[in-house]
Image: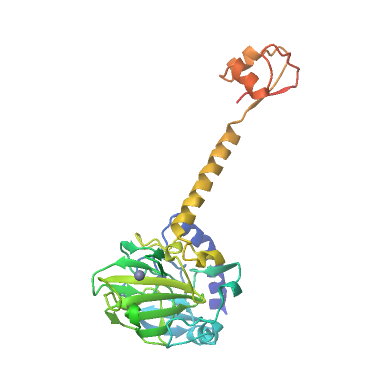
Amino acid sequence: MRLLLLVVAMLVGFVAEAQDSLAMAKIDTLKRDTAVVEKPMPVRPVKTLGQVSAIDTLATESDKISIILFNDNTWRYVMSENYKADSEVFSDHWNTTATHAYSDVELNSLPEATPILLIDSMESYHYPYIGRITSRYGPRRGRAHQGLDISLKTGDPIYATFDGKVRFSKAAGNYGNLVIIRHNNGLETYYAHLSQRDVEVGDWVVAGQQIGLGGSTGRSTGPHLHYEVRYKGQSFDPERIIDFSSGNLRRAELLLKRRHFSIYAKYEQDFDAEVEVEKIEEAERKAAAAIQYHTVRSGDILGSIARKYGTTVTRICQLNGIKSTSILRIGQRLRVR
Ligand SMILES: [Zn+2]
C-alpha cells in the first residue's frame, strides 16, 4: 500500500518535472535512479542508457507496475507485462507477418486529434540513433517517403525509442532487415535496412534497448537507418517528436492531428509557421506594452506634456487626431506613445 502511495505521489510530482525538462529541451534519457527499492527516489533524467541491459523484473504490490533492474545497478518502474498483455494495444490488429497491420483502417476513421503520451514516470524514451538526416519525410522523386533516413556506419547500434513489444522482425523486401515495435502508447516505430536484428516477434523491449545494428539491406544505396513512426498504420514526420541532431525528445505529450498524416505535412513547415506566429504575437505584445497615456491636469499644455514624455507635439497630435491648437480639457486622456 505504501509503495502504491509513493507511486501516485511520484506520478503527480513528475508532471511538473517533465515540464521543466521540456523547457530545457533535455529529455534524452531513461528516468532511472539507484536501486533502493524500499524507498523510491524521484525518477529523473540521468544519462543515456546505451548498452545497459535489464537483468531482472520485480513485482510490486500493484499488478500494473513492475520494477526493472539494470546491470549497472539502476532501476525504473515500468507497466507490468501481464498488464500490458491484456491491453488492446497489443491485441488489436496484432499482425506479426505483415509490415502494415492496419491496412483496413481508413484515415477518415481516425479522430481529428489524438493525444499521445510520450513520456512520464512510467514511460521512457531513447533516441533510435543520433546522426545527420540524409532524406526527410515527404514526397521524394514521385514517391512518398514515409520515414526519414539517418546516415550511419554499418554495425552501429540502434535503440528502441519507447517501451513496447516487437510486432515484426524479419527481412521485408525494400525495407531489408526490419524491426517494428508497437509501443504502450499505440505508436509503432520502424527500423529498416538493419545488418543485424537483436529482437524477435513477441519480445518486450524497453526504451534504449539495442534492437539491432545499422546496415544497408533491402533497397538501399548505402548504410543508413530508415526510421518511421506510425499511428494506426498512418505515418507522420518523425521530426515531430525527435530532434535527430541532439537525440532529444521534443515534447512529453504529442497532439497528433489527422492532417499530420499527410505526406506533405512536414514538421519543419509547421514549425516555421509556428515561429512566424510567435514573432507576430511578440511584436504585438511589445507594441501594446509600449502604449502610454497621459491624463490632462490643470495647467497642462501640449508642449509640457511632450517634454515630460520625451516626445513632440506633432507626434501627440498624430496619435490623438488633434491639432496643436486644440483646447485640452482637464481629465482628457491623451495617448503620448
Ligand atoms: Zn528512407
Which residue is depicted at the point 48% across and 85% down? 81
Query: How was the colour assigned to the protein in this rendering?
Result: rainbow
Q: In the image, what residue occupies the spot 46% across and 79% down?
A: 182
Ligand number 1: quarter of image: bottom left
> Which picture quadrant has residue 289?
top right
Q: Is residue 148 left or right of residue 8?
A: left
Residue 101: x and y, percent? 48, 83
Looking at the picture, does residue 220 appear above or below residue 170?
above
Residue 208 in percent (x, y) is at 37, 73
Quadrant showing the C terminus: top right
- Eyeballing the image, is 94 above or below 11? below
User: Does residue 36 appear anywhere in the picture?
Assistant: no
Question: What residue sits 63% from the left and 16% below the top?
Answer: 305
Which residue occupies the extreme front position in the image?
A: 142
Q: Please say whether residue 196 is visible from this viewpoint.
A: yes
Q: Dividing the image into 4 quarters, which one contains the N terminus?
A: bottom right
Q: Nearer the viewer, residue 161 or 180?
A: 180
Horizontal and vertical percent position of residue 52: 32, 75
Q: As rendered, which of 142 and 218 lies closer to the eye?
A: 142
How far across and how far down the image is residue 336, in percent? 62, 23
Question: How many tags in the picture?
Answer: 0
User: Which of the 4 quarters of the picture holds residue 155?
Assistant: bottom left
Residue drawn at x 54%, y 82% as measured from the top left: 104
